[in-house]
Amino acid sequence: MHFLKKLLVLAALSLTFASPGQAAVSADEAKTLVDKAVAHVKQVGIEQAFKEFNDPAGSWVKGELYILAYDYQGTNLVLGSNPKMNGKNLWDIKSPDGKFVVREFVELVKTKGSGWVDYQWSNPESKKIENKTTFVTRVPGMDAVIGCGIYKN
């Protein structure tokens, strides 16, 4: 019985000190972040919002959750996890499963307004190719998509 109590205490401690990066995030959290980002664009304007979204240490980057944006030609406008990508055209970038990811983001927004795109991508934490899904919608006031994705662990 004493052993069982120690085991339970150790299990509880391991949960208490688990890294926040280990916690899986939900699709709802990604969509909520996009909804908040859209509202923020409407509130402060595109230029100010994009500046904030591109700050890796800012409040719009929460572990694997971050805002991304591309114009309809595939140029990266926002990548909260790596703002060095801003200005680069990623229209022809393919995921490991052969999908033109940015093209799919743009096509979905143009045809349906918003939705989810499933693809494979390298997870920077696990260093493995994993299934990912990204929610995208239109940036208010411009021909561009804004989104946030999660790894489907």
Image (cartoon, rainbow, N blue to C red):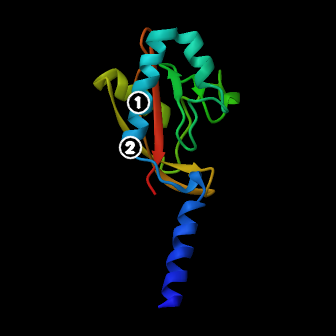
Q: Which mark is residue 127?
A: none
Q: Which residue is painted at 35% across and 29% down in the image?
A: 108
Vertically, is 77 above or below 64?
above
Report crowding for label 2: few under 14, some 14 to 19, many 20 or more residues within 10 A (C-alpha): some
In this picture, is 83 found above or below 29? above
Amino acid residing under circle 2: Ala
Residue drawn at point x = 65 percent, y = 27 percent: 55
- Mark yes or no: residue 142 visible: no
Most distant residue in the front direction: 2
> From where the camera sits, is residue 19 visible?
yes
Q: Tell me which numbered mark, 2 or 1, is placed earlier along the sequence.
A: 2
Label total for image: 2
Cα distance between the residues tagged 2 and 1? 12 Å
Q: Position of residue 74 (x, y in %)?
A: 53, 24
Identity of the residue drawn at 47% across and 91% down: 1
Nearer to us: label 2 or label 1: 2
The residue at which mark 2 appears reads as: 27
Q: Around disc 1, counting alpha carbons within 10 Å, would you say few (fewer than 14), some (14 to 19), or many (20 or more)?
A: many
Q: Mark 1: which amino acid?
A: Val
In the foreground, 63 or 124: 63
The extreme left residue here reads 112
Identify the mark at residue 136; answer none if there is no mark.
Answer: 1
x, y percent for residue 59: 58, 30
- Quarter of the figure with residue 62: top right
- Residue 89 is situated, as x and y percent measured from the top left of the image, at 61, 25
